[in-house]
Amino acid sequence: EGLEIVKEKTQDASTEKHVPFVEEKEDGYLVKVGKEMAHPMTEEHYIQMIEICVDDFLYRKYLKPGEAPEAYFKVPKGKSVCAREYCNIHGLWSN
Ligand SMILES: [Fe+2]
């Protein structure tokens, strides 16, 4: 009671600025929100966290207004990779 199940969204009809985009790098993964256009990072509207799941591991970075809407995860590579982010206004998104 008092808890709400947050359902993740995967498609942004307008500009795709919420769907996290994963770039594989030499020693980890860079996750950006979003691909073509960066999501705002103002006090009123910003990405609160970005997380990446690599096989059986989950890594999370919390962000503050004013920072870039991206996170670099220097972690071992895996076979299956997915990413999620949480926008304070538009909710949870995954790729
Ligand atoms: Fe948003």
Image (cartoon, rainbow, N blue to C red):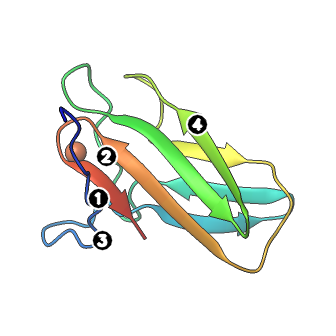
Question: How far from the left and from the top, in percent, is residue 41?
Answer: 33, 31
Give residue 3's quadrant in the image. Answer: top left
Camera-near label (3 vs 1) is: 3
Amino acid residing under circle 3: Thr
Helix, strand or loop under label 2:
loop
In this view, 72 is above or below 2: below
Q: Which mark is residue 17?
A: 1
- The residue that mark 3 highlights is 10
Please identify the residue farthest to the top as the structure is shown.
Answer: 43
Per the model, the C-alpha gap separating discs 3 and 4 is 20 Å
Amino acid, disc 1: Lys
Secondary structure state at the residue bearing disc 1: loop
In the rendered image, the residue lying farthest to the left is: 14
Secondary structure of the residue carrying numbered label 3: loop
Task: Specify whether 22 is left or right of 8.
Answer: right
Q: Nearer the viewer, residue 52 or 43?
A: 52
